[in-house]
């Protein structure tokens, strides 16, 4: 889909894979609203070469917590107002906010897995994704279909209209959720995290079916391990990886390489769920 001059919501866009996505979208001339507990890196605008005032206005940061439904709702409302003021229609949401936590079913002291860890991981990774997605979706279904947008832009020349009509299938936008290879092959201690990612994986197809009638694609990406602040907290990550069969020698790529996955999302024009396993 065309990302230039469309508005995208990126939760968790201040760090790691979300931040890598924000950089890609800005480079593609999109408008990006980052929804995150932490602020965006101060050098982001300069780093992306967005020097003039118009370019700087392509980025909006909203401090919020995806576990708080009222904060999600007011953040989405703010983004919608922003998109009206810039004229850049909403184009989609990328759910990058997430946390990892490790806890055994029964720990070495004989204590069962805490409900606190379970509740927190599910609240951020699953319920946070659910709330942000449904509240963005409410607005996404009202934006003009892509061929209408291209027609509007092509008023100066008929050929532009014809070209747009040919290339577009009337898509309105895209919903991207981030699962993990852990949805398919969790490690010891990853019960809550694996449950949250497995649920993301499972909700993708029914949501894609729901949203297809509106011309909104729903995609889940299941990345292998990337080197981000989240995985920086893991102990013995390479040992953990050596215990698995899915994870591979190219593990702990830099977030920059996430664009290989996220870029695949935009040119497609049908709903699907993607499992990406790095090849050995
Ligand atoms: N890094 C990996 O190897 C990897 C692999 C597979 C899947 N993932 C998934 O990708 C997503 C991003 O992970 P990452 O590695 O970039 O992590 P990260 O820690 O670098 O970034 C996560 C971002 O989410 C924000 N965040 C956390 N809780 C929040 C909340 N309650 N409300 C709003 N913002 C919140 C953080 O402030 C941070 O900016 C997560 O869902 C993660 O599970 C990561």
Image (cartoon, grey):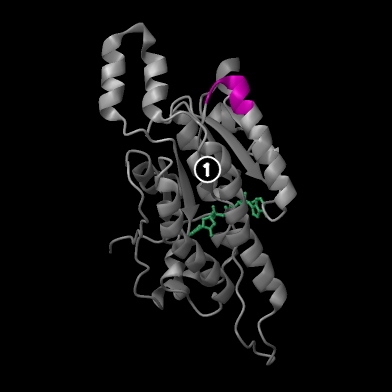
| Classed neighbour count for the residue bearing mark 1: other residues with Cα under 10 Å, few (<14), some (14–19), many (≥20) | many
Residue furthest out toward the front = 213
Query: How many numbered discs sit on the rendered protein?
Result: 1
Q: Position of residue 163 (x, y in %)?
A: 26, 20
Closer to the camera in the image, 235 or 185: 185
Residue 83 part of the magenta segment = yes
Evaluate whether residue 222 shows in this view: no
The residue furthest top is 156
Residue segment shown in magenta: 82-88
Which quadrant of the picture is home to ligand 1?
bottom right
The x and y percentages for residue 47 are 54, 30
Under 8 Å from ligand 1: the CB of mark 1? no
Q: Is residue 29 above or below residue 252?
A: above
- Is residue 23 in sight in this rendering? yes
Residue at 36% of width from left, 26% of height from top? Answer: 147
Q: Is residue 85 left or right of residue 224?
A: right
Residue at image location 44% in from the left, 44% down from the top: 256
Q: Which of the pair 253/278 is nearer the observer?
A: 278
Q: Which quarter of the figure has residue 171?
A: top left
| Helix, strand or loop at mark 1 | strand
Majority secondary structure of the magenta segment?
Answer: helix
Q: Horizontally, is 152 left or right of 199 in the view?
A: left
Q: Between residues 158 and 106, which one lies in front from this camera angle?
A: 158
Provide residue 185's location: percent of width, then percent of height.
42, 73
Whether residue 183 is situated above or below residue 112 in the rendered picture: above
**Residue at mark 1:** 93
Position of residue 37 relative to residue 154, above or below, is below
Magenta run includes residue 233: no
What residue lies at 64% left-to-right and 87% top-to-bottom? 107
């Amino acid at each position: 889909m065309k990302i230039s001059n469309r508005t995208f919501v990126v939760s968790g866009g201040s760090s790691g894979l979300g931040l890598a996505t924000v950089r890609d979208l800005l480079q593609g001339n999109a408008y990006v609203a980052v929804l995150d507990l932490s602020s965006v890196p101060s050098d982001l605008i300069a780093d992306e070469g967005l020097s003039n005032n118009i370019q700087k206005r392509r980025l909006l940061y909203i401090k919020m917590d995806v576990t708080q439904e009222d904060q999600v709702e007011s953040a989405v409302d703010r983004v919608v107002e922003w998109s009206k003021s810039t004229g850049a229609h909403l184009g989609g949401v990328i759910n990058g906010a997430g946390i990892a936590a490790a806890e055994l079913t029964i720990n070495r002291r004989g204590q069962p897995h805490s409900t606190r860890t379970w509740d927190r991981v599910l609240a951020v990774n699953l319920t946070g994704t659910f709330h942000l997605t449904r509240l963005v979706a409410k607005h996404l279904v009202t934006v003009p279909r892509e061929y209408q947008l291209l027609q509007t832009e092509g008023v100066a020349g008929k050929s532009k209209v014809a070209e747009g009509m040919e290339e577009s299938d009337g898509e309105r936008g895209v919903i991207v959720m981030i699962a993990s290879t852990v949805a398919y092959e969790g490690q010891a201690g990853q019960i809550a995290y694996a449950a949250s990612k497995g649920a993301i994986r499972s909700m993708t197809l029914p949501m894609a079916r729901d949203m297809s009638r509106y011309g909104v694609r729903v995609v889940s990406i299941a990345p292998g391990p990337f080197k981000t602040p989240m995985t920086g907290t893991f102990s013995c990550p390479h040992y953990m990886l050596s215990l698995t069969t899915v994870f591979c020698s190219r593990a702990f790529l830099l977030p920059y390489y996430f664009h290989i996955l996220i870029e695949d999302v935009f040119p497609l024009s049908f709903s699907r769920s993607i499992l990406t396993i790095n090849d050995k």
